[in-house]
Structure formats: structure tokens, C-alpha cells
Image (tube, coloured by chain):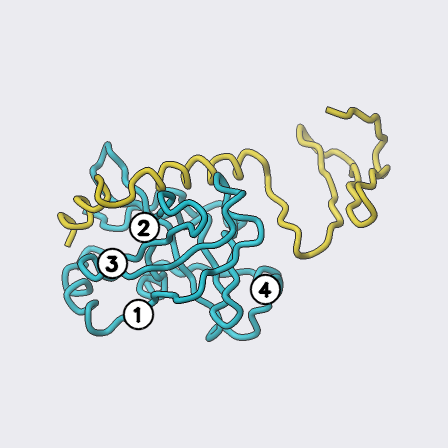
Amino acid sequence: MIRDHSTQLSRSNSSFPAHETDKAIYFKYGIPGFESLTRFFIKNLPEYAPFLLFQSVEEPEVSLIIVDWAIYQSEKPLEIPAETKCQLKIQSDSEMNLYVILSFDSQSQQLTANLKAPLIINKILNQGQQVILDDPTLEINYHLFDQ
Amino acid sequence: MLVLTRKSEESIRIGNNIIITILNSRGPGIRVGIEAPLELPIYREEIYLRIKAENRRAATLHPPGLMMQTLSTNR
């Protein structure tokens, strides 16, 4: 499970690659709720690694906290359908980054991860899409630190 | 809203490449078949609305607000 997170975080500063993008990533349809925003930067949050900032180019005040799901993939795997990869012209998984948007559950004071709708990015073409996965067991508010 | 009456197995064409077909209903639900270009995302509306609400909620937590405090305390 994800309970022993402190060791992962202390390792994170050195072992996770930098995600910061110098080019904006193009989201043809925006993302749900921000359909008119089509270009986003991913910025490192050095103080808060491995968390990253997903920030709109057009409206920089629209910024979301995301995390590279590769860190958690072995604990809570997310499967991306072939047609999504096809839409984004992803030919192999090495061309793809998979991020999950984080949010905050005020009741439990916990971070939650939206596993139902991850961000898929073709890092070669700098194109992305927020995909809504069919799997009905995936949670929109998955508790990342299950305490 | 445009309202059209269709029988089972009849279709509606939207533009030149989207076809929506009413299929036989089984049980309480109505089954709808959709043919559309692969690059066009298709969602169940209520799920789209939930993701939309969640994205908007997540976007209100940008730094240096509550989210950052949470990230700090969760380290």
C-alpha cells in the first residue's frame, strides 16, 4: 500500500526526473471545466517533490497539482486504452507520461487523486488529453495517503 | 433541444461523420450506438460533469493555499 510514503518522498528529490516543460503541452479540447484552455505548462515544485504544477498558459491562475503516476503505478495500476494512445499518436509507452490530478478532501484533511480521469501526455509531440477511463472501480477521490 | 422520434435500429446523422443509432432497449435503460471519428472524445454526461466539478475544485487549491499546507504536512 501507499502508507510508507515518507521514504518515497525523501528519495524523490534525487531520483525522480525533472518534468518541467519549456514548451507548452497542447490539449486540443482543454480539460473538463476548462474547455477553452488548450496550452499548459508542467512546472517542478522543488520544495514539494514529487508533486508538480500543471498550469494554464492562457490563464496562469488556473493551476492544478499533479503527480507522475509512474511513482504509484505498481501499487495502483492505471491502464490506458489503446484508442487513447492512438488518438495521441503514442506508439510506445516510453513516449507517454501519465499524471494524476490531486485534490484535497476537507473532511478527512487528506490528499486525494483523481484516478478516473488521468492526464495522458505524448512527450514527443507535446500533446495531451485528460482521459475519462471506463473502469467503474476507479475513484475520483482516491486517498493517496491512506492513514 | 431538437427532439426527433426514432424507432429501434433507426439512426440520426450529425454532420457527415457522426451516426447515433437507437438499439433495442433491454431492461430499464436505452442502448445507443455511436459511430464517430476516433479523435472525438465521447463521454457519459454525468461522469463528464463529475470530472468537470472535480477539476474546478482541484484548481482552487493552487499555491500558496491550502494545498501547499497539505503537501507540507503530508511529507
Image x and y of residue A78, in percent: 43, 59
Q: What is the secondary structure assignment of the residue under circle 1?
A: loop
Closer to viewer: mark 3 or mark 2: 3
Q: Which mark is residue A18?
A: 1
| Contact check, label 3 and label 2, Cβ < 8 Å | yes
Q: Secondary structure at mark 2?
A: strand
Residue with the mark numbered 3: A45
Q: Amino acid at mark 4?
A: Ala
Q: How far is the residue under mark 4 from the one under mark 3?
A: 31 Å
The Cα–Cα distance between marks 2 and 1, rounded to whole angstroms, is 15 Å
User: Splitting the image into 4 quarters, where does residue A12 fall?
Assistant: bottom left
Say few, some or many: other residues with alpha carbon within 10 Å of mark 4 (under 14 / 14 to 19 / 20 or more): few
In primary-sequence order, the first of circles 2 and 1 is 1
Tell which chain the image draws in yellow: B
Q: Are marks 3 and 1 on the same chain?
A: yes
Q: Which residue is mark 4?
A: A82
Chain A hue?
cyan
The image shows residue A69 at horizontal and vertical percentages of 36, 61
**N-term-proximal mark, 3 vs 2:** 3
Q: Chain of mark 4?
A: A
Residue at 35% over, 62% down: A68
First in sequence, mark 1 or 4: give its number.
1
Which secondary structure, mark 4?
Answer: helix
The subunit carrying tag 3 is A
- Of the numbered discs 3 and 1, the one sitting upstream in the chain is 1
Q: Position of residue A121 (x, y in %)?
A: 48, 63
